[in-house]
Structure formats: C-alpha cells, structure tokens
Image (cartoon, rainbow, N blue to C red):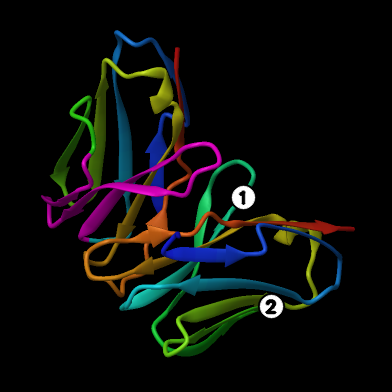
C-alpha cells in the first residue's frame, strides 16, 4: 500500500468511550500532522510531529492525545469527547516539518460523537 | 478579517470553461499550498508555491508575493474537477487555511 492511510474511515462513539485513530505513511517522510475539519469551517492544524517529536500543539483539549511511536505511524487517542468534536480528522505527512514542504493527506476518519 | 481569503466561495460553471479561483493573504509566508478536497473528504495536495507559476496537466497555479495573492486556474474544466479547492499559507511554523471554494462543473 502506498501513500498515507487512515483507519478507521468512519467512527461513531459515545461520549464515555475511548477510541484511537490510526495513520500510517509509506512515503519515508519524517513529519506527520493531525488536522480537524468541522462542517463549514476551515481546516485546523492540531498536532505536528517531526522525527517522532511533537513540535506543535495548537491548544488542543487534553481529551485528544497524540502518539507517534515512529516516523511512519501516528495515532490520535480519543476519550470523553463531546458532540462538537464530531468532524473529519485528517492525517498528513511531509518530508520534514519545514514550511516549504508539500504535505500528503490521508483519506480522513469521519468521527461522530453521540 | 481572516488571514487567508478565497474567492469565490462557490462557483458553478459549464464543462469546458476556464476556471479561476483566487486566494489573498495578509501575512508573510514561506510557501502557499493549493489543495483539492473531494466530496468524500479526501484531500489531494495540488501545488506548493513560493514564487512564480506551476503547471500540472490542466491546472495552473500562480503566486505574486508582493501582492500577497495567488490564483488557481483550470483549463478545459470537466465534471470530475468538481471539488472544494483550498488555499493554505505557511508563515513560520503555523499553517493557515482558507475556507475553500466549492466548484461544481456541469456536464
């Protein structure tokens, strides 16, 4: 498999559940990103990992917990979410975390919180 | 005022028409990205520009750094070009997205 993959593609969870989103990139990149896209709002950058180290956290609530065990894998652990967290969650990767890098996106996980 | 403004917000055109989508930004940037988001949510990175012009197939992207403006052009548009086109700029370590332009090409 090539490119950036995300699983699951769709997820419905209750507010008390704990779930995880997974992202895997097969591009040999060193930087990975989590984005959130809510309905009718621009994409929001949540987290950036560069060489497995978190380099950016854009004031994301602690109910979202990222994990980057290696440069190819990125997880987003979810717990006690709110209905307003329902959104499309997109993962991306780039060669490094520099500002001039092209980012390659996964297909996204559409999350619904009941 | 948003730091990245796209126009138009929505655009419907006939197949074959020449399409222009505009992006203006108010911050200094190191690069500007054009992204395409299909109805299912998947995003494709089309271009990354820091100056001048780039062409890929029927798509052309230009940027004027002095005027803080970029345009995305589609020649000989086709219904499969129907998508949301998003402009994003990267000043320093942030990335700022426009709200997108929803393009619908009619057969």
Q: Is residue B66 above or below residue A105?
A: below
Residue B11 screen position, x and y as percent: 75, 60
Chain letter of the residue beneath label 2 in the structure image: B
- Tell me the number on the disc at residue B47: none
Chain letter of the residue beneath label 1 in the structure image: B
Residue corresponding to mark 2: B58
Observer-nearest of A14 and A71 = A14
Query: Image quadrant of residue B81?
Result: bottom right
Residue B7 screen position, x and y as percent: 63, 66
For the residue labelled by badge 1, is the local secondary structure a helix, a strand or a loop? loop
For the residue labelled by badge 2, is the local secondary structure a helix, a strand or a loop? loop
Q: Is residue A1 visible?
A: no
- Tell me the number on the disc at residue B38: 1
Query: Image quadrant of residue B85?
Result: bottom right
Q: Residue furthest front?
A: B1
| Residue lying at 65% horizontally and 57% vertically, measured from the top left | B9
Q: Residues within 10 Å of mark 1 (few under 14, many from 20)?
A: some
Magenta residues, start to end: A30-59
Q: Residues within 10 Å of mark 2 (few under 14, many from 20)?
A: few
| Residue lying at 44% horizontally and 69% vertically, measured from the top left | B33
What secondary structure do most residues of the magenta stretch adopt? strand
State yes or no: residue A51 in magenta.
yes
- B102 relative position to B52: left or right: right
State yes or no: residue B82 in magenta.
no
Question: Are labels 1 and 2 on one chain?
Answer: yes
Q: Is residue A55 visible?
A: yes
| Residue lying at 59% horizontally and 78% vertically, measured from the top left | B71
- B103 relative position to A43: left or right: right
Sequence-first disc among 1 and 2:
1
Residue A100 screen position, x and y as percent: 30, 75
| Residue lying at 75% horizontally and 78% vertically, measured from the top left | B75
Query: Image quadrant of residue A93?
Result: bottom left
């Amino acid at each position: 498999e090539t490119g950036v993959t995300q699983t699951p593609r769709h997820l419905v969870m209750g507010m008390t559940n704990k779930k995880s989103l997974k992202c895997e990139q097969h591009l040999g990149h060193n930087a990975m990103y989590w984005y959130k896209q809510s309905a009718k709002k621009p994409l929001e950058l949540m987290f950036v990992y560069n060489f497995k180290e978190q380099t950016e956290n854009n004031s994301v609530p602690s109910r979202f917990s990222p994990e980057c065990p290696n440069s190819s894998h990125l997880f987003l652990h979810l717990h006690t979410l709110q209905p307003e967290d329902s959104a499309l969650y997109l993962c991306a990767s780039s060669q490094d975390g520099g500002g001039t890098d092209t980012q390659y996106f996964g297909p996204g996980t559409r999350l619904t919180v009941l | 005022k948003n730091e990245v403004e796209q126009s138009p917000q929505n655009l419907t055109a006939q197949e074959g028409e020449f399409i222009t989508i505009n992006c203006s930004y108010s911050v200094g940037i190191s690069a500007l990205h054009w992204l395409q988001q299909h109805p299912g949510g998947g995003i494709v990175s089309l271009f990354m520009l820091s100056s001048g012009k780039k062409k890929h197939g029927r798509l052309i992207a230009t940027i004027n750094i002095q005027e803080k403006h970029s345009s995305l052009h589609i020649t000989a548009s086709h219904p499969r070009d129907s998508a949301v086109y998003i402009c994003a700029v990267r000043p320093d370590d942030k990335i700022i997205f426009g709200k997108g332009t929803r393009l619908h090409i009619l057969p």
